[in-house]
Image: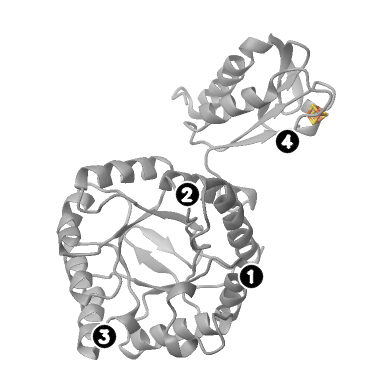
Amino acid sequence: MQRRKSRPVRLGAVTVGGDAPVSVQSMTNTDTCDVVATRAQIGRLVEAGCEIIRVAVPDQRAARALPDIMRGLEVPLVADIHFDYRLALAAIDAGVDGLRINPGNIGSRDKVVAVVQAARQKNVPIRIGVNAGSLEKDLLREGVTPEALVQSALRHVSILEELGFYEIKISLKASDVPLMLTAYHMLADKVDYPFHIGVTEAGTLFAGSIKSAVGIGALLWEGLGDTVRVSLTGDPVQEVRAAYEILKALGLRRRGAELISCPTCGRTRIDLVRIASEVEQRLAAIKQPLKVAVMGCVVNGPGEARHADVGIAGGIGEGLIFRKGQVIRKVQESLLVEELMKEIDHIIQGRNGDEGV
Ligand code: SF4
């Protein structure tokens, strides 16, 4: 796949756009003023592989919490501001690595200038986040259209460009996937700023992950998208896991284990659903790239999953452990998961010298 050439933008140590890998981001859903809860959630997000963290800054109390939230933080933090320029200035002052604010919503020109000057001084990029649910009224004559989303983004862009500010990322989000896809396509021909992509208000874990995979996956496959957020109603850690699954499925990132498991059929004679779900949970702790197969039968299993690094294939009350399609031993059903994990441990120890999983 040929990725769109975008202008690189830096958020702390992370580059978005240019030749940088597509980064994964998420947003905390704790009360930003609750520093302990927010730091704990950020810790879980970082552990899951989140590379950029966004927090809502709805008021000055939240802005005052930012320095404590950022203390010792190893990933860039973006402050999400709706329109209050004083909050944007306070967040920049607190040392955030990025801002999400639409300059057209800030108000008078001197307020926009103040935010842009502060952002420039501290090398803080600005994400313009256009959302289908909050478009300017004059753009809605024909309803919410891709043209209206693009038009809105270009207005915000031109405000920043007129002030000589080019450290910009853009998102055009909608919960309607075809609308979102068309809008990003249209904008791709008009600007070279990196794209933050996602399907907004995608839904709960199951439906939202599928909708996001379709929308984000379609854009990425066509080379559009520099940083990704999956928006789910639920634990943001699941957003990070879903984002990596999308990126791994397209071969854009390699992180952690990839589980291949068969759908089961009339040949299955072991409790494969339970085994696959237990293996999935145990693999969550592994950060190295690894393909693990959980297959229902010995007839087709190892052959179907020969590209996996390691796997199991069920028999009757027992199963086989195989590596790269070659059977290495037979194990009782009750010990299959344990033996598989031992094999995985050997593989990782072999790669790391002696560091273990
Ligand atoms: S691997 Fe075996 S059990 Fe699983 S779907 Fe294929 S044939 Fe059926």
Q: Residue at x 51, y 80 (%)?
A: 149
Does residue 189 appear in this view?
Answer: no
340 relative to 352, above or below: above
- Which of the two residues, 333 or 31, is positioned nearer the viewer here? 31
Q: Residue at x 73, y 35 (%)?
A: 307
Please, what is the three-letter code of the amino acid marked with disc 3?
A: Gly
Instruction: Write down the residue under mark 3.
Output: 107
Which is more N-terminal, label 1 or label 3?
3
- Which of the two residues, 266 or 301, is positioned nearer the viewer here? 266
Q: Measure the C-alpha gap from mark 4 to mark 1.
A: 34 Å
Q: Measure the C-alpha gap from mark 1 to mark 2.
A: 21 Å
Direction from residue 182 to residue 68 in the image, left or right = left
Instruction: Write down the residue under mark 2.
Output: 239
Q: Which quadrant, please, contains the N terminus?
A: bottom right
Please, what is the three-letter code of the amino acid marked with disc 4?
A: His
Please, what is the three-letter code of the amino acid marked with disc 1?
A: Pro
Which is more N-terminal, label 3 or label 4?
3
Instruction: Write down the residue under mark 4.
Output: 307
Assign a secondary structure to mark 1.
helix
Whether the residues at callouts 3 and 1 have beta carbons within 8 Å, the answer is no
Q: Measure the C-alpha gap from mark 4 to mark 2.
A: 27 Å
Please, what is the three-letter code of the amino acid marked with disc 2?
A: Glu
Which is more N-terminal, label 2 or label 4?
2
Instruction: Write down the residue under mark 1.
Output: 178
Point out the frontmost of discs 4 and 1. 1
Which is more N-terminal, label 2 or label 1?
1
Does residue 70 appear in this view?
Answer: yes
Whether the residues at callouts 1 and 2 have beta carbons within 8 Å, the answer is no
Whether the residues at callouts 4 and 2 have beta carbons within 8 Å, the answer is no
Q: Residue at x 81, y 29 (%)?
A: 265
